[in-house]
Image (spheres, rainbow, N blue to C red):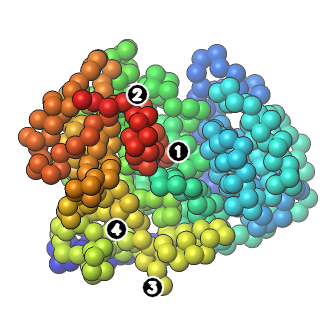
Amino acid sequence: MTTGLQTSYWPADQSSPIWDMTVGDVLRRAAVLAGEREALVEVAPDGAPSLTAAASTDRRWTYRQLLDEAEACAHWLLARFAPGEHVCIWAPNVPEWIVVQYGAALAGLVVVTANPALKEAELRHVLKQSRASGLIHVDQFRGYDMAQTARRMDDVVRERISLTGFMDRLKIVEPVRDLPPVAPDAPVQIQFTSGTTGLPKGALLHHRGMVTNAAFLVDRSGHLNEIWVSPLPLFHTAGSGLCVLGCATRLSTLVLPCLFEPRLMLSAIERERATVVGGVPTMLVALLEALPEGRSDLSSLRVMVSGGSPVPPKLHERVEAAFGCPLTSLFGQTELSPSLTASSPDDSAADRTETSGRPLPQVEVRIIDPQTGDVAPIGHDGEVQARGYQLMLGYVGQDDATARTILADGWLRTGDIGHLDSRGYLRITGRLSDMIIRGGENLYPAEIEAALTRHPAVAEAAVFGLPDDHWGEIAAAAIRLHPDTAQIDAADLKAHCRKLLSPQKTPSNWFVVEAMPLTPSGKVQKYTLKDGALSGRLRRID
């Protein structure tokens, strides 16, 4: 293990071997080692109809059953697509999503993931950008007629497939040939980036990267035979990567809510005796707010895992106190398959609260001073960069964007600002694009947001820059108040900040929102807040 860093460079820890396997290999391995263990449990609100016209919404699969259906799905897909083709899944968290994920991997197809909330123009962009040959979709979700939108894609894709009755179709599949060989370095998914600064790009990920990264992440936070409850969307790497594949690598059970609803989550944790819960900070806030509504037995929980964006220290403390278990954090991005660092339940409370942990095995990490291009001293902020097995193959159809992100010597620029301590623990302080330069001084939103969420009335905070004639740029803050807080004034918020921060870091402009604009992975879209502030759409606090 690396200790006592002299500069902000972490050499790869090679003590844990890379998993030289495909996604299909991982499922086959689980079926051999733990074929009768539950692999997948479906969870839906009481009385809700099945989104795929299944006979029930509480279905369960063992690893053996899941492999059988995935192999049937692979043969079904190969009757329609050739190995190497791209097939888009446009659906919420239904079990069929995972069956198709594994089936496509066994068939040598590349899965393109799409948010079920995408409107027609957005879906068309995803399909064209990813060069998808097929579109697999649910017909309806939350009042959205997805089938109608899907029909308008017939000029873009060759095959359009509804998931309604899909599992029944697999029961009559006759294998027509052997499944093709698939290499661990072959493409497996095209995941679209969060879109915190604009139009998402399609990151092409490979089997080895997604499998190994999932295994290393769950090793950091879990053990064998866990029971995970995760509402994280399958169209994101945290859902279909870390949760689905992480559970399979460690022979654990994935409990899959069809949507994030706090009471549904809490009841699933209690009923299934969950040991691990995954989420993002906004979900943690919602779970905390739902706890007083009723009593839940959460004593089975061993650890909670959060990603997507840093967890403010005050929220971290509240979660650990309310749920009675450690909360660990990870840092990563889609292009990294997706995790780079993670904390452990065994870390100190301070390290769990204040850092995103240390790098996972088999990856180099460095902090680069954006002004000089040199490796930064220990404790100094700079851009987080990574090099290792897990890097994406590139952005589909965007060679220039790929070249700007992955340097010639193999280092990937994350665009995130942070610093390493001498032990290798990473603290994220913001995005390069979010950094506020006030009178020549760099201000990092994460530090200001952490201070704001310590105010008893503030549930969430997002800090962003606004143009200013004198300073060039000034800090502005949008806050969401706790439900039991009716109003607040700017003077109170400024006084609170002055107690915790130097004066130049105190926001000059204040706004209140009912909800933060989020990407699918739970990150705040600060450009949306900035546009709202400049256009007058955000409600100002005086």
Q: Residue at x 41, y 36 (%)?
A: 536
Q: Which of the two discs, 3 and 2, sits closer to the camera? A: 2
Q: In the rendering, at what x and y percent does residue 44 appear?
A: 60, 26
Proximity of marks 3 and 1: CB atoms separated by less than 8 Å: no
Distance (Cα) linking label 1 and label 2? 18 Å
| Sequence-wise first label, 3 or 2 | 3
What kind of element bears circle 4?
Answer: strand
What kind of element bears circle 3?
Answer: loop
Q: In the rendering, at what x and y percent does residue 347 appear?
A: 23, 52
- Is residue 478 left or right of 336 when viewed as pictured? left
Distance (Cα) linking label 4 and label 3? 15 Å
Mark 1, residues whose alpha carbon is within 10 Å: few (<14), some, or many (≥20)? many
- Residue that mark 2 sits on: 514
- Residue that mark 1 sits on: 520
- Residue that mark 3 sits on: 409
What kind of element bears circle 2?
Answer: loop
- Give the camera-side residue of 515 and 67: 515
Distance (Cα) linking label 3 and label 2? 45 Å
What kind of element bears circle 1?
Answer: loop
* Residue furthest bottom in the image: 409
- Give the camera-side residue of 389 and 452: 452
Residue 378: quadrant of the picture: bottom left
Proximity of marks 4 and 3: CB atoms separated by less than 8 Å: no
> At label 1, which amino acid type do we have?
Pro
- Residue that mark 4 sits on: 384
| Residue 163 visible (yes or no) | no
